[in-house]
Image (cartoon, rainbow, N blue to C red):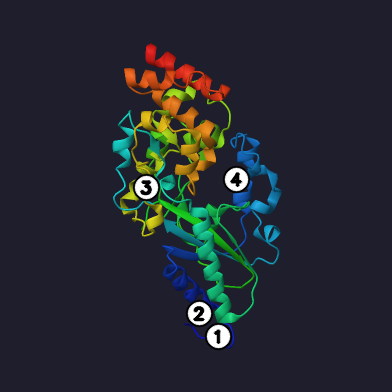
Amino acid sequence: MTAPLPATDYIALAGEIKRWARELGFADAGIAGTHLGDDELHLQRWLDDGHHGEMEYMARHGSKRSRPAELEPGTLRVISVRMDYVPPGTRNAWDVIHDPTAGYVARYALGRDYHKLMRHRLQKLAERIHAAIGDFGYRAYVDSAPVLEKALARNAGMGWIGKHTVLINRRAGSYFFLGELYTDLPLPADEPASAHCGSCRRCIDICPTQAIVAPYRLDARRCISYLTIELKGSIPEELRAPIGNRIFGCDDCQLICPWNKFAQEAVEPDFAPRHSLDGAKLVELFSWSEEEFLKRTEGMAIRRTGYQGWLRNIAVALGNAPHSTEVRQALQARAEHASPLVREHVAWALTRQSS
């Protein structure tokens, strides 16, 4: 156990915080200041362009998202952490995408929801700091408040924001979660990471729905992750075919990124795929009752889409699947579903199957 510091040496404390973070299971940690002026302007332009779609919460909190001290008064520094999420043994993502009878689930969502797990570990980190220096002000966030987590992580030296708007670490790719500990400690800030995308535009070119409308500009209204998770209504018809078999989220822009040859496997066993969701058959998933859906997705991010959204997404994927009696029968079994949303997408899929 670390002995309390008689007079706080913030340089030494910063080093200890990073070591404690790794001991708690985080892959990395860094420290950022609170100035996000350029990022605030970028966010406002994105909102003004309407690229957030129905995600009204992105505009709801004003400048609190880009000014940490407004969200948590007294904040001087942000301790940013990351945690790798693709465990060993997970079915190859491209193999699933190229199997039109299987449902593709974004790799981050295959196992336990990361929010509570990471927030609990951030609390443990705060307790270690308290044990060393006594009382201090802090608050932990894991995608649970208006926080510009990628910008803060970049400023903490943990990676740069790529052209697909995802954070990339040159030693670990981009398959990781982020979390933050806002604090009133005057810790030395790390140097921001420099960008290394160069002239590469593979992520832009591969996007199935062309949602990356320019380098570093994502129109969420076209993004498959938005369409299959955040959007609660009907998926625009012109975007249904490009979705393919992606039923919850999309990883194409990350899968094609050359930096992910350095991606690290997760060490957290709770991130292991549940219910063979790293490549389960669409027909099987479409047969789940609401009770089965709620039971099998308990404690998972997939719950976010809701049961109707789950059926909507799979109906689209079945409409994109090879023609077969099995697929048509599965769709016909849901043709009179109580939800108008589900019925609409099933009808579209049946039309595709019969054409």
Q: Give the Cα distance between marks 3 and 2.
A: 39 Å
Of labels 4 and 1, the one closer to you: 1
Say which amino acid is labelled 2. Ala
User: Which is closer to the viewer, label 4 or label 3?
Assistant: 3
Q: Nearer the viewer, mark 3 or mark 2?
A: 3
Q: In the image, is residue 58 above or below residue 271? A: above
Q: Nearer the viewer, residue 328 or 180?
A: 328
Residue 225 x %, y %: 49, 37
Mark 1, secondary structure of its residue? loop
Residue at 49% x, 62% y: name it.
81
Mark positioned earlier in the residue sequence (2 or 4): 2
Provide the residue designation for mark 3: 273
Residue 226 appearing in the image: no
Q: Label 1 sits on what residue type?
A: Leu
Other-residue count near label 1 (Cα within 10 Å), few / some / many at <14 / 14–19 / ≥20: some
> What residue sits 42% from the left and 36% below the top?
204
Question: Percent x, y for residue 59?
Answer: 67, 43
Q: Earlier in the sequence, mark 4 or mark 1?
A: 1
